[in-house]
Amino acid sequence: MRHICIHVDGFGNIGRAFTRLLLSKSSLLDALDIRVCGVYDSTGGIYKPDGIDAQRIEELLKLPRSSLGSVGSKALNVAETWRAGDIIVEATPSIYDESHPINKRFIELIYSGAVIVTANKAPLALRPDLIVSYGLPSAGQRLYLSATVMAGTPLVWLAYGLAGRRVKRLIGVLNATTNYILTLVEEGYSMKEAIRRAQEEGIAEPDPSIDIEGYDPAAKLAILSTILGYPRSINDVARTPLTAIPEEEVRSPGEDVRVKYIAYLDPEKAYVRPEKIGTSLAAARVAWNMNAVTIEVEDYMIEVTGPGGGPSPTAGALLSDLINAARHRERAV
Ligand SMILES: NC(=O)c1ccc[n+]([C@@H]2O[C@H](COP(=O)([O-])OP(=O)(O)OC[C@H]3O[C@@H](n4cnc5c(N)ncnc54)[C@H](OP(=O)(O)O)[C@@H]3O)[C@@H](O)[C@H]2O)c1
């Protein structure tokens, strides 16, 4: 059997963290006969069907962003180089517009039979049918998505484990940036100062609107909802921005309640918004970067608290998914 070729599509924070992690696991790479054959950024890429050697990858990891077109080929992208049996690790930006070329390429790749391990939430949040057809555990699974929601905590695997059970509701904190900002506001910062400080610390993006306006948690909630048996796109999740809540309410919410940026779903509705919730819920008790989810199933509750994204946890989730994808491929041949 030919070795498994990995293509790392997107060589930014996550693509690089994942590539570094992969290089540090040489015995695993040997055991699964995995080689990194392609790496790509917005400027182009490098592709070697027999694998790019580790020393060369180390050199690529030292280059500034947007360098692959100049050290490799400007014309290259993963849609041209991948072959059946390869695994694509998708770490390009999440852009919530189905007609964007990155999303169109993702959808075409899946329809063409590609196996994709993804950190990019957007195509899945825009097209829940992709999760239903290719992203649930089955012999035909070709889409692996643990890195898209609470990457540091295997929440997606917990959600898979609830197949066939009636989920009455889910309530949680799925976005670390808004939780970090609310924690700063509780400590006395104004909302504006808290956002600026989160940006300075590298927690919030230079353009924080994806988090503040709720796109990121809405995308995660749509993905979870679909896995839990209520297929929804991001457009089915109502969004209220973080800044809609008065700062005084965050600082003095009242007894046994806290203000959190809540993601909520039940069979009828799904929304993300700043909201007061009781401290009996795990979501009310997590501060800073932590995420938490309570799922009410049948007549019992499950609670999970743990780290969300960030380069290292996300790279770890991509690696776990890659191992599963490689094992499925071994069984399929
Ligand atoms: N950061 C986190 O903690 C986290 C956690 C979970 C999931 N995610 C998701 O992971 C993905 C990557 O996040 P990130 O933080 O690594 O973003 P990032 O640092 O901006 O990296 C994005 C990479 O994609 C490349 N790219 C852009 N357009 C491309 C194209 N058409 N073809 C190939 N590559 C292209 C960029 O190229 P250039 O280098 O040339 O700009 C860059 O290398 C996003 O979808 C994000 O939502 C992130």
Image (cartoon, rainbow, N blue to C red):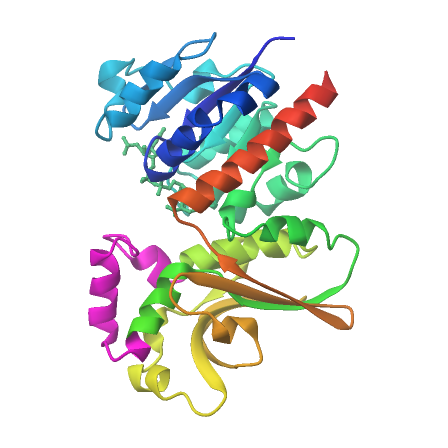
| Residue 44 seen in the figure | no
| Residue 88 seen in the figure | yes
- Farthest front residue in view: 27
Q: Is residue 72 placed above or below 260 in the rendered structure?
A: above
Residue 48 locus on image (x, y percent) = 42, 9
Q: Nearer the viewer, residue 144 or 101?
A: 144
Indicate the quadrant containing the C terminus: top left, top right, bottom left or bottom right.
Answer: top right
208 falls in the magenta region: yes
Q: Which residues are magenta?
A: 185-214
Residue depicted at x 45% and y 11%: 51
Residue 312 locus on image (x, y percent) = 41, 43
| Residue 106 relative to residue 165: left or right | left
Residue depicted at x 64% and y 48%: 157
Residue 100 locus on image (x, y percent) = 39, 38
Residue depicted at x 70% and y 55%: 229
Q: Quadrant of ligand 1?
A: top left
Residue depicted at x 50% and y 26%: 88
| Residue 313 relative to residue 200: left or right | right
The tally of labels here is: 0
Residue 81 locus on image (x, y percent) = 45, 14
| Residue 300 relative to residue 126: left or right | right
Q: Is residue 293 placed above or below 117 in the rendered structure?
A: below
Indicate the quadrant containing the N terminus: top left, top right, bottom left or bottom right.
Answer: top right
Q: Is residue 94 placed above or below 272 in the rendered structure?
A: above
